[in-house]
Amino acid sequence: MKRVVIPELLDTDAGTPREVAGSLADLDMFNRRFGGVNTMASMLQAVAAQRKLRSASWLDVAGARGDMAARTVAVLAGQGLEVKPVLLDLAASHLSRHMAAVCGDALQLPFRDNSFDVVGCCLFLHHLEPEQIADFVNEALRVARHAVLINDLIRHPLHLLIARAGMPIYRSRITRHDAPASVRRAYTVSEMHEMLRPTQAQQIEIKEYFLFRMGVIAWKKKNTI
């Protein structure tokens, strides 16, 4: 299945405030029910175990209103790991008023080197073109002390069928456009390996999760911390 780039409406808030809010609620539903929260929690737990962290600061890139971050924090709190998230989004209108949040560009993160234990993103990377992905990961590695986490979709024909079959449960017209567009724009695991090979990461780990999710851990070289 060939990758096709179709602009997503939520990226530019191309809808009424109610439609945008409905689409953000749909994203929360996807992450809650279909593996997004569990994927991120699993990766954060893996970093904490590997680097022996009792707590972790986390920059959530393209974190929108923080639904996924808040749910992930709650899951990990139940497992004894304290995670402190900060949201970053290009659209100030998406950001939560109830969590620490910064409006900024993912390719030029407005933070000093080693500002967070982990930099992560969920359902963001497929918005980038291949030539931008290494740039983003290297920039995120600059800001991270331990690792960069990528939580995203896997492009697959069956995944596209599932995205289309879900139309009746989507709250927003924006989601009915963006859900299949996201699948068609996503990358495969082998493509992700190839795109991340030239980065400054010490090691890349990619694992497949429930319902066509991939979780990527790009480990930072310890001598650069």
Image (tube, helix red, strand yellow):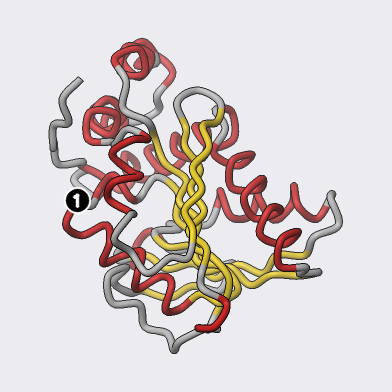
Query: Disc 1 marks which amino acid?
Result: Pro
Visible residue check, residue 153: yes
Residue 202: x, y in percent? 47, 65
Q: Which residue lies under the disc numbered 1? A: 130
Front residue of 169 and 197? 197
Bin the neighbour count of mark 1 within 10 Å (Cα to Cα): few under 14, some 14-19, many 20 and up: some
Q: Residue at x 35, y 44 (%)?
A: 193
Front residue of 93 and 27? 27
Visible residue check, residue 97: no
- Quadrant holding the N terminus: top left
Q: Residue at x 64, y 39 (%)?
A: 38
* Residue found at the very far bottom of the displayed protein: 112
Q: Name above or below for residue 51 compared with residue 24.
A: below
Q: Name above or below for residue 22 compared with residue 135.
A: above
- Quadrant holding the C terminus: bottom right
- Tell how many labels: 1
Q: Residue at x 32, y 11 (%)?
A: 161
Front residue of 215 and 122? 215
Residue 189 as seen in the image, left or right of residue 222: left
Residue 187 as seen in the image, left or right of residue 60: left
Residue 173: x, y in percent? 27, 29
Local SS, label 1? helix
